[in-house]
Amino acid sequence: MAPDDISVPDMGAIAGRKALERAEEIVGGQVDLILHASIYHQGRDHHWNSAPYIQRELGVTDAFSLNLEGMSNGGMAAIDLAMARLEAGRGTSALITTADRFCPPGFDRWRGSYGILFGDGATAMVLSTTGGFARIHAIASITDSSLEPLHRGTTPFTNAYGVVENENLRTPKKSYLEEVGTESVLRRAEEALMSVLATVLSRTGNKLDDFARILLPNMGHGLMEAQFFKPLNIPAERTLWNWGRYAGHLGAGDLTAAVARLVEKKEVSPGDRVLLIGTGGGYSVTVAAVEIESVPEWPETTTDFTLPADVTA
């Protein structure tokens, strides 16, 4: 859990600063694009964007900064969109940040959703056309909008912001699952996943077995089994699930944090291929194939895992 005296946008700025320091030899002070992704409250209810705040706090000039709403897939979607801009020649570097804090009275991090514990965290990643420790060989995204009601529920739309206490994702999910059945939701989610995965593998010429690690969203084992392990026919040991279940679901930042974890813990080597799979309400899926070209000497990020006595990860 993040300290209460640090705002969520400041969390994003702290992560962004660390990422830029780590990428200093590659990008110097050049940042052309800043995309900030999140899924929860960013310190202001409306009429304000946190991405320009992060840009200002970092002292970055001559960049385009924008908030991105992609639910839990926001961080991965930001990578996809940033890559498209860089590949089009509209800049040479981009900073992707994420930040979220899940706290009362608005949200119960322990019981706010089925099979997911929510962790506070901020992440950042620098993309550059001029170098780096890893290379993204392919990335693809898709949205199956037939699953959009899963996170909306049946309550009417409103015309203004309101204070919501104990907001949760269980209520809309329960109503939709009762309407269409769990099997229907899992089938469509699997079809979207396998479609994007097939696109990425075809572009790289790889098979799933070619990847040393497969990084996934941070969820409980039951949900991971149904949504990823079984459809992909992979064991949990090929992922970072054992870390993710304690770190918790970091909003839009699970995959960026997982990449940093692999590097900091020296759990990858040059030449290893790593597959990143992000998913988010909507229902969107982004898959990226990454090759590790070098392993930087980064100190391990300190993480405090604290669980209540009546909660099991």
Image (cartoon, rainbow, N blue to C red):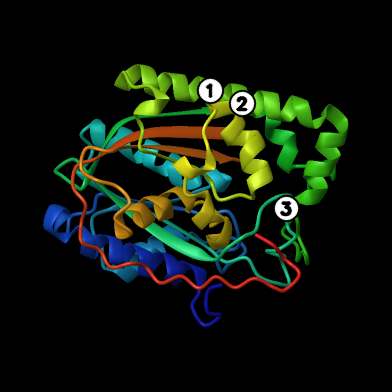
Position in image of residue 190 (x %, y %): 61, 26
Dot 1 lies on which element? helix
247 up-or-down from 133: above or below: below
Give the residue at mark 3.
113
Quadrant housing residue 106: bottom right
Can you identify the residue that label 2 sits on? 190
In the displayed structure, 84 sits above or below 38; it is above
Q: Earlier in the sequence, mark 3 or mark 2?
A: 3
The three-letter code of the residue at mark 1 reads Met
Residues under labels 3 and 2: Cα distance?
20 Å
**Label 1 belongs to which residue?**
194
Residue 51 is situated, as x and y percent measured from the top left of the image, at 42, 58
Q: Is residue 143 visible?
A: no
CA distance for labels 1 and 3: 25 Å
- Tell me if I can see residue 140 in this picture: yes
Question: Could you say which is closer to the camera, residue 101 or residue 48?
Answer: 101
Q: Amino acid at mark 2?
A: Glu
Quadrant holding the N terminus: bottom right
Residue 5: numbered disc = none
Pointer 2 and pointer 1: residues touching (CB < 8 Å)? yes
Q: Does dot 3 land on a helix, a strand or a loop?
A: loop
Left or right: 268 as drawn, with respect to 224: left
Q: Residue flagged by tag 3: what amino acid is it?
A: Ser
> Residue 157: x, y in percent?
79, 45
**Image point (48%, 52%), residue name:** 254
In this view, 286 is above or below 11:
above
Q: Considering the numbered disc 2 on the image, is that residue within a helix, a strand or a loop?
A: helix
- For the C terminus, give its image quadrant: bottom right
